[in-house]
Image (cartoon, rainbow, N blue to C red):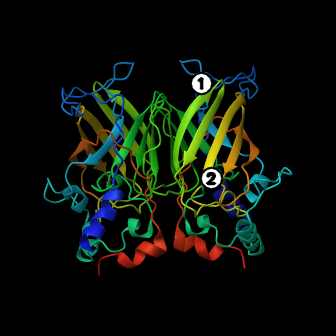
């Protein structure tokens, strides 16, 4: 019986797809320390499937000894969420993970597709996406508050810098429950160190929730020769399995 | 009060974003009858924001052919669903619309992003996406049954042909509920007629549910100078508004 369960689990794993543009070592394996790919215009190409290998960031994005400068209400809310084991987090009701929360789930990688006018982030988790516009547009004058915000990207040297505003106040920065307000402004700096490694330094600027901007750096590993799976969240089915008190 | 409601709806409409690649008439308006744009390899570029030209295909994907060639069980299931006004359809539980249903909702456009290795369809509705691979890979030997299936695309002259297999048996072709089995194979032939118009000839091949393959040709119009908005389905909030019996 447990063998059967294992078989089913294995079948639900990512499809192995040997992809053309992957540098390889002499034994045919992906060479994860090869130089980062470049696009036709000479910028690093972030395209590929990535995942955060370290689940600690999902539990607490500030895990590396970063001091979080909470405003008092935000400290109280974080404490309450910690005390209830994050029972009320939006993803428990199939609502979106936020920024950067959606990129922190080790079990569900995400795909970056860098194109001339827009960089897409396709999340395996819940089958959702983000667009980062690079076609020269600015932020709209009025923005409806959204879960994933409105994102504009630009290059600074070899770093892709993404500004995101227009958030609602409902997403959590991590599953542990670092909160934010609708004044949240995320500045993400994506740096692809080599073929197999990318770092994201994210600055959380939200004067309503934090007394000053604070930042964390999150590592990602390339997920070679694979494709994202479809992962649809089904509310009624999943809710009974939620933990918390 | 009515005016107030209208104003709220207008605010939730798409922002006007003059985009650089939009061809224009002498008065600066988008020239939607300009020729279809091309990618650098000379193929038509399907990229853009599209919405279905007519709402009736959502009401009945077989509208133009009278009746689909149902197998008896599928005819009975369709009648049951249609008699209940489509109650129980997956989208009311925030589960994906499926193919082609996700492209038929007139209030919710979708964006095509055509890149060298993959064509991505970003649905405004539910913030879901679909990938159509064009990097030369074939279908995996085994796929998990999924809502959007696994799609491979190729060009036949100026027509983009997407083949999709690996569906679950739960999505509906349209809101009244044309059903399908997990044997479904869908062929979509995308043709961009000019800058502002596209047609998709979609063929359903599902011998378990239908006695022969059948097709529908669906018109789409471009939404120029705008952006899709985030539209998240919130189960608990939306459920009570569902119509049906």
Q: Position of residue A229 (x, y in %)?
A: 56, 49
Q: Is residue A149 left or right of residue A106?
A: left
Disc 1 on helix, strand or loop? loop
How dense is the environment of label 1, judged by Cα within 10 Å: few (below 14), some, or many (20 and up)?
Answer: few
Frontmost residue, B16 versus B178: B16
Query: Chain letter of disc 1?
Result: A
Q: How many marks?
A: 2
Q: Position of residue B96 (x, y in %)?
A: 43, 59
Evaluate whether label 2 is on the same chain as label 1.
yes
**Quadrant in the rendering for residue B21:** top left
Q: Badge 1 is on which residue? A: A21
Q: Which mark is residue A102?
A: 2
Is the residue B192 above or below the residue A232 in the image? above
Mark yes or no: residue B32 visible. yes
Name which residue lies at 54% across and 35% down: A113
Q: Position of residue B30 (x, y in %)?
A: 24, 34
| Residues under numbered marks 2 and 1 in contact, where contact means CB atoms less than 8 Å apart | no
Disc 2 on helix, strand or loop? helix
Frontmost residue, B240 versus A155: A155
Image quarter (top left, top right, bottom left or bottom right) of the C terminus of chain A: bottom right
**Quadrant in the rendering for residue B7:** bottom left
Name which residue lies at 35% across and 54% down: B102
Closer to the observer: label 2 or label 1?
2
Image quarter (top left, top right, bottom left or bottom right) of the N terminus of chain A: bottom right
Q: Position of residue A53 (x, y in %)?
A: 75, 46
**Which numbered disc flags the more N-terminal residue, 2 or 1?**
1
Q: Is residue B20 left or right of residue A177?
A: left
Name which residue lies at 72% across and 61% down: A3
Is the residue B222 above or below the residue B55 in the image? above
Q: Which mark is residue A9?
A: none
């Amino acid at each position: 019986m447990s063998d059967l369960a294992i078989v089913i689990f294995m079948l639900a794993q990512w499809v192995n797809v040997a992809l053309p543009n992957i540098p390889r070592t002499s034994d045919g394996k992906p060479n994860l320390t090869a130089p980062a790919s470049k696009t036709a215009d000479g910028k690093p190409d972030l395209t590929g499937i990535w995942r955060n290998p370290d689940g600690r960031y999902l539990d607490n994005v500030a895990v590396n000894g970063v001091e979080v400068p909470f405003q008092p209400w935000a400290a109280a809310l974080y404490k309450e969420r910690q005390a209830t084991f994050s029972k009320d987090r939006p993803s428990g009701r199939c609502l979106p993970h936020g920024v950067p929360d959606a990129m922190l789930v080790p079990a569900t990688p995400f795909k970056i597709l860098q194109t001339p006018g827009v960089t897409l982030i396709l999340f395996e988790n819940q089958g959702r996406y983000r667009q980062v516009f690079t076609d020269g547009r600015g932020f709209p004058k009025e923005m409806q508050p959204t879960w994933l915000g409105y994102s504009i990207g630009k290059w600074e040297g070899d770093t892709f810098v993404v500004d995101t505003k227009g958030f609602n106040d409902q997403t959590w920065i991590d599953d542990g429950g670092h909160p934010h307000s609708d004044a949240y402004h995320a500045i993400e700096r994506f740096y692809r160190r080599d073929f197999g490694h990318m770092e994201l330094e994210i600055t959380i600027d939200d004067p309503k929730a934090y007394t000053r901007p604070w930042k964390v750096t999150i590592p990602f590993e390339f997920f070679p020769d694979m494709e994202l799976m479809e992962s649809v969240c089904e509310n009624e089915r999943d809710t009974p399995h939620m933990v918390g008190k | 009060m009515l005016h107030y409601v209208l104003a709220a709806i207008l605010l939730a409409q798409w922002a006007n974003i003059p985009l650089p690649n939009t061809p224009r008439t002498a008065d600066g308006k988008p020239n939607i009858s300009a020729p279809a744009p091309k990618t650098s390899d000379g193929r038509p570029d399907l990229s853009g924001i599209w919405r279905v030209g007519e709402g009736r295909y959502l009401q009945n994907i077989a509208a133009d052919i009278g009746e689909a060639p149902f197998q008896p069980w599928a005819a009975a299931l369709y009648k049951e669903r249609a008699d209940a006004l489509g109650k129980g359809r997956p989208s009311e539980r925030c589960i994906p619309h499926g193919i082609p249903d996700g492209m038929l909702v007139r209030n919710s456009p979708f964006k095509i992003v055509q890149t060298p290795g993959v064509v991505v369809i970003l649905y405004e509705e539910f913030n879901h996406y679909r990938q159509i691979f064009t990097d030369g890979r074939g279908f995996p030997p085994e796929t998990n049954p999924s809502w959007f299936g696994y799609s491979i695309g190729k060009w036949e002259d100026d027509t983009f042909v997407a083949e999709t297999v690996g569906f679950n048996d739960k999505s509906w072709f349209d809101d009244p509920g044309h059903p399908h089995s997990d044997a479904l194979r869908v062929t979509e032939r995308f043709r961009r007629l000019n800058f502002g118009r596209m047609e998709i000839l979609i063929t359903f091949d599902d011998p378990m549910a239908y006695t022969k393959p059948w097709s529908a040709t669906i018109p789409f119009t471009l939404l120029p100078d705008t952006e899709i908005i985030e539209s998240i389905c919130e189960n608990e909030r939306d459920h009570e508004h569902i119509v049906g019996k």
